[in-house]
Amino acid sequence: MVYTPFPSIRAGRPPTPSALREAIELHLKYDLAKQPSNATLRDWWYATCLVTRDLMVERRLETFQTQEYHRARRVYYLSMEYLMGRLLLHNLACLGITEECRQALQELGLELERIAEVEREMGLGNGGLGRLASCILDSLATLDYPAVGYGILYQFGLFHQEIVQGYQVERPDEWRELGHPWEISRPELAQKVSLYGELKRSGLPTDPAQWIATTEVVGIPVDILLPGYGTQTVNFLRLWMSRSSRELDLEAFNRGGYFEAVREKTFCESISKVLYPNDKTEAGKELRLVQQYFFVACSLRDILRRFWRENTRWEDFPKKVVIHLNDTHPSLAIVELMRILVDEQELPWDRAWELVSETFSYTNHTLMPEGLEKWPVPLLQKVLPRHLEILYALNHRLMEWAEKRFPGDGDKKTTLSLIEETTPKSVRMANLAVMASRTVNGVSRLHSELLRSRFFAPFAELWPDKFTSVTNGISPRTFLLMANPRLAGLLNRAVGGEWVRDLEKLRGLEELAEDSGFQAAYLAVKEANKVELSNWLLQRGLGSVDPHSLFDVQAKRIHEYKRQHLNLLRIVALYLVLRERPQLNVPPRVFVFAGKAAPGYDVAKRIIKAIHAVAARVNSDPVVKNKLQVLFVPNYSVDVACRLIAAADLSEQISTAGTEASGTGNMKFALNGALTIGTLDGANVEIREEVGEENFFSFGHTVEELQELRRKGYQPKEWYEKDPLLRRAIDWLFSQECLGNESPQALEPLRKALFEEGDRFFVLADFRPYWERQQEVDVAFFNRRRWAKMAILNTARMGRFSSDRVAREYATRLWRLSPLACANREKR
Ligand SMILES: *Cc1c(COP(=O)(O)O)cnc(C)c1O
């Protein structure tokens, strides 16, 4: 690659537009072999990214030197998923050169925003969990914490969703098709990992064993630089790509001939091929287990390599290394570290456990039983025989501790055990993570409380000090500065620009909440965003909407617990009422849905079908024209999220109480001035507390009330029979009038879930309170000044939900990590 000199950078000043222009042209020529006359938009995008990367590299090298010099304690954030979104505008903003770059491109006759839109999103995650990981890494760099993210470089990210005749169709997400200028490949740091094979041993399970006749896989790391906002610090995300090495091919060739060699090569390359598109439910598939192990084994070897570069004694390991487990997906790291210490380093078992139990921290992300990972013992026996043995040995210790603490209490031991006595037996990864981690946190106050009191109750008795809570947050860069430039501009003028690094500064808006001039400006921003979204929807053929309507948005994974079907039933009920009384005075509403369903989750896919069926009837009925519209935006992604949150008036956060661990979508909308209609679930509880009850539309049964309903024997049929409006809505939704030409079976699985299967998520029980609260929303929306005040106060009071606060809490309370800024820190 050509060297592009930026003398002005080293002097601590941003490069001028003309220096940037020159650098873009150099990259265009020497990296892409193109001239301005034949360059495509893609070429310009690529060259602009490379220049941006050059500037980040300068800072990365300094960050590296600083951290190495201080032998910094670092956190290693292990996550199977990251939902990074597009990076160009974000990286430019972090470097503080957005305007310079815009001008440089202008001089070339190009527009920055159009160039940025060429980029394919890095969609290496399913949803909230992956996006949280990305937000936390963004904040750790912004706050100068020494941190490395580890993950997998999936060749195919989360599937691309298309809608064909109202049904979701999944297509492969070929996100690297246009090349990926952000990647820095590090073949020199490749790692070798073993799988399958058998054990050779002489002593006890706690003695060193030999794992032989294994299949070898190579992991090649690819780095993505992660700049902090307004600081010199640049951290990185290291993603592993699986390969077989040529040397290994030859071995396989000698063993089993050509076909064996090719088979093994194909197997090795398949490991990092595709992200499992499951949200909350675990597939329990062999390749997924292999993927998890490949990921943690490569990452651990890399962590140990860095540790030994800077240190000389094992006892310093827990002082220099914190390994964070983002959910249980990377929890095999615990067992792998035990194996390395006992088998390869020949440390005594107890000493190894001491080191391991000082090193890990674990975040739990779900209360749903189907979300808790379990691996069948026979599968572990086949893929990771030594690890299974270590798991049994660890469980033996755990049972000893349990017997000491709860003598004779068999039930307690059964719930604590790492092994579940199903047929076949399985290993509970959450129990392992809790047992081995110094800290275990939930992601909202309610969720952490439920973890402690219900799901991990005996663990909390055994180790009360482990359990803690860190409520999730979102990056103010991604979800306000980037997502909503108009609002960001207004906020800068109102309270200054410091909120980007300190979101609590938005408190300053409180005193403007009743200022009619500010209210008008604030509403004008929302209006402009709604016009922009309307145009975007129109261009994509998704519908033509009136920007003066109330934009009512539910955007998130499609899941029964998130209850898109509750929203839909309310829409149907409103439609039926409006058909009878077209003059009813309600504000016109546009209902927008977006979200992907896991490909194997039938009921969720039927919910998508149901939304489209309702949309087809409602949108074509002249009686409700200009009153009611239903849209589905396909392929929900960070980009779509940003467009929707900037334009939304109302945010639907209506999960069954006790099911959504936190939610982060709820925070994005509220920060951008959408009011929330929501249940007392996850972080909704805390958002409502912060913004004030009078600025939040809460409804529905609480966790305790639902428990009581369950206890008494919840009968959805009774709720159906006693509420005529609900009955009409349900009858219509499942009638041929709604289905049109579709087969009467099209929505049958959804109907069954609500009746025959007992409505696990209490849709029917929450219908009436939801309906009533929505009527209050209508009234509030008519009063523009009152609405503006409520929305402004939402923006003003969301400071607590910055991922900067989250990163600081993890760093200080869980990781005991200190910030470490580069020496000649640049003030910008
Ligand atoms: C924030 C976000 C999510 C999580 O949304 P929830 O409402 O918390 O479920 C999922 N997907 C994308 C693309 C997001 O940006």
Image: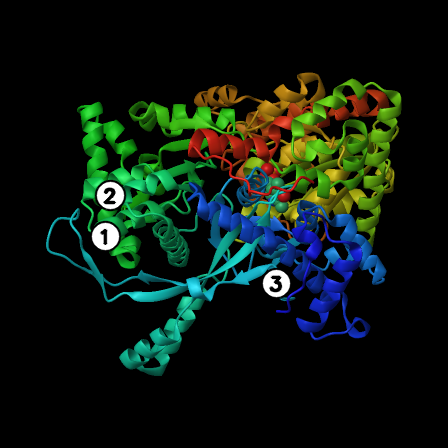
Which residue corresponds to the image point at 64% horizontal and 69% vertical from the top-left? 2
Q: Does mark 1's beta carbon lie closer than 8 Å to ligand 1?
A: no
Residue 435 position by quadrant: top left
Residue underneath mark 1: 345
Task: Determine if residue 542 is in view.
Answer: no
Callout 1, which amino acid?
Gln
Label ID, residue 707: none
Q: CA distance from mark 3 to mark 2?
A: 41 Å
Q: Position of residue 626 (x, y in %)?
A: 87, 38
Task: Determine if residue 308 is in view.
Answer: yes
Viewer-nearest of discs 1 and 3: 1
Q: Nearer the viewer, residue 279 or 822?
A: 822
User: If you read the primary sequence from the N terminus, does the residue marked by circle 3 or circle 2 appear first?
Assistant: 3
Residue underneath mark 2: 352
Query: Which SS class for mark 1?
Result: loop
Q: Position of residue 37 (x, y in %)?
A: 82, 73
Q: CA distance from mark 1 to mark 3?
A: 39 Å
Which residue corresponds to the image point at 36% horizontal and 82% vertical from the top-left? 258
Q: Does mark 3's beta carbon lie closer than 8 Å to ligand 1?
A: no
Question: Viewed as shown, does residue 490 lie left or right of 202?
Answer: right
Callout 2, which amino acid?
Ala
- Which quarter of the image is occupied by the N terminus? bottom right
Label ID, residue 180: 3
Q: Nearer the viewer, residue 86 or 382?
A: 86
User: If you read the primary sequence from the N terminus, does the residue marked by circle 1 or circle 2 appear first?
Assistant: 1
Which residue corresponds to the image point at 29% horizontal and 53% vertical from the top-left? 380
- Which quarter of the image is occupied by the C terminus? top right
Q: Are there few (<14), some (14-19), or many (20+) residues within 10 Å of tag 3? A: some
Ligand 1 falls in which quarter? top right
User: If you read the primary sequence from the N terminus, does the residue marked by circle 1 or circle 3 appear first?
Assistant: 3
Q: Are marks 1 and 2 in contact (CB under 8 Å)?
A: yes
